[in-house]
Amino acid sequence: MGKHTIHFLLACSFLWAMLTFAIRAKGEELKFNTQEVREMWYSCAAEFRIIMPSMPEQIRAFLCDCYSDHMRQKYTPDQVKSLTKAQLKKLGLAMRKTCPLPTLQPKIDT
């Protein structure tokens, strides 16, 4: 392997170790696995496509990121899965304050 490849692998290993340490140092374990986060985000985006089909993709992505972050911080996967339709509706109304519709186009760094 080339010198650059070895440095890259070492840097990735170091970053992974630091991230793992930082998460554990905070006392927070990841509650949602990758699949659950994707499903939650996709459900949000699909719902916005239905109720607001003219919403720009960038705003939809911004809102669904906010919604998903909020849900991951406040709930466990089991709590999210057990929410009733009435609870989901109430939560959706509350999310308008938590994640308001941006007045300017949000910049999403990719």
Image: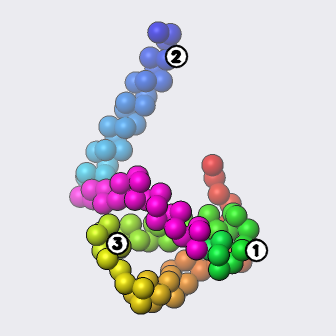
- Residue at the disc numbered 1: 54
Distance in Å between CA atoms under marks 2 and 3? 45 Å
- Residue at the disc numbered 3: 81
Earlier along the polypeptide chain: callout 2 or callout 1? 2
The percent position of residue 94, horizontal first and vertical second, equals 48, 87
Earlier along the polypeptide chain: callout 2 or callout 3? 2
Q: Which mark, by number, is residue 67?
A: none
Q: Residue at 73%, 68% (x, y): give it.
A: 56
Q: Residue at 59%, 68% (x, y): give it.
A: 46
Query: What range is drawn magenta here?
Result: 26-47
Distance in Å between CA atoms under marks 2 and 1? 46 Å
Q: Main secondary structure of the magenta part?
A: helix
Earlier along the polypeptide chain: callout 1 or callout 3? 1
Left/right of residue 55 with respect to residue 13 in the rendered view: right
The percent position of residue 25, horizontal first and vertical second, equals 25, 52
**Which circle, 2 or 3, is nearer the viewer?**
3
What's the image's color scheme? rainbow
Whether 59 is drawn above or below 38: the answer is below
Residue 19 included in the magenta stretch of the image: no
- Front residue of 16 and 34: 34
Left/right of residue 75 with respect to residue 99 in the rendered view: left
Question: Which amino acid type corresponds to the residue marked 2 in the rendered image?
Answer: His
Q: Which mark, by number, is residue 4?
A: 2
Is residue 26 among what the camera can see?
Answer: no
Left/right of residue 46 with respect to residue 14 in the rendered view: right
Q: In the rendered image, which quarter is residue 83 located in?
A: bottom left
Question: Which amino acid type corresponds to the residue marked 3 in the rendered image?
Answer: Lys
